[in-house]
């Protein structure tokens, strides 16, 4: 919304889905909003990696991130993930992935239930 307002454009209805769709059409305000979201997500994931000592890796899951990845590169996620001052070298060794499998949580619950 902020990116649209700053560009003098109307705020589209439809939330994240509309933003991703507009981003895939190359609309600059949508691309700016998506990049800002990805960068904030990367910064937050880096914070969590430090808090939980996630040396084994971090997996970003959820519906919007894989859809954003089809419209623009997720380079900002990794850049902001590692931008933690004296911890940057350690964070550079932590793998970061994006979960793209649909219904992964339900599949995991089904396996846990079965076992």
Image (cartoon, rainbow, N blue to C red):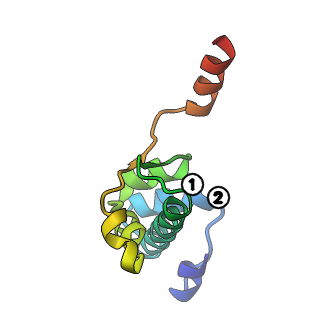
Q: Position of residue 11 (x, y in %)?
A: 62, 74
Q: Position of residue 64 (x, y in %)?
A: 53, 52
Instruction: Tell me which residue sits at (61%, 75%) in the image.
Output: 1
Quadrant showing the C terminus: top right
Helix or strand or loop: what does disc 1 sit on? helix
Q: Residue furthest right?
A: 113
Helix or strand or loop: what does disc 2 sit on? loop
In depth, the one of 10 and 105 nearer the eye is 105
Task: Tell me if mark 1 has few (under 14), some (14-19) or many (20+) residues whose alpha carbon lies within 10 angstroms of its own.
Answer: some
Q: Residue 86 occupies which quadrant of the picture? A: bottom left
The alpha-carbon separation of the residues under discs 1 and 2 comes to: 6 Å
In-image side of 89 versus 52 (left or right): left
Q: Residue furthest top?
A: 114
In-image side of 113 versus 65 (left or right): right
Instruction: Look at mark 2 in the image and give the residue it sits on.
Output: 14
In depth, the one of 92 and 10 nearer the eye is 92
Instruction: Tell me which residue sits at (55%, 56%) in the image.
Output: 52
In depth, the one of 65 and 16 nearer the eye is 65
- 76 versus 17 height, above or below: below
User: What is the number of the mark on residue 17?
Assistant: 1
Looking at the image, do the residues carrying marks 1 and 2 touch, with CB atoms under 8 Å apart? Answer: yes
Q: Position of residue 84 (x, y in %)?
A: 42, 76
Instruction: Tell me which residue sits at (45%, 48%) in the image.
Output: 66
- 115 versus 104 height, above or below: above
Q: Residue 16 occupies which quadrant of the picture? A: bottom right
């Amino acid at each position: 919304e902020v990116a649209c307002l700053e560009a003098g454009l109307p705020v589209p209805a439809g939330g994240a889905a509309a933003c991703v769709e507009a981003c895939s059409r190359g609309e600059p305000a949508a691309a700016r909003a998506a990049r800002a979201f990805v960068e904030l997500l990367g910064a937050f994931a880096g914070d969590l990696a430090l808090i939980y000592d996630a040396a084994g890796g971090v997996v970003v899951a959820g519906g919007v991130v894989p859809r954003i990845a089809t419209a623009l590169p997720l380079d900002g996620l990794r850049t902001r993930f590692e931008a933690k001052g004296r911890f940057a070298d350690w964070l550079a060794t932590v793998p970061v992935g994006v979960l793209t499998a649909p219904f992964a949580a339900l599949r995991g619950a089904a396996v846990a239930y079965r076992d």
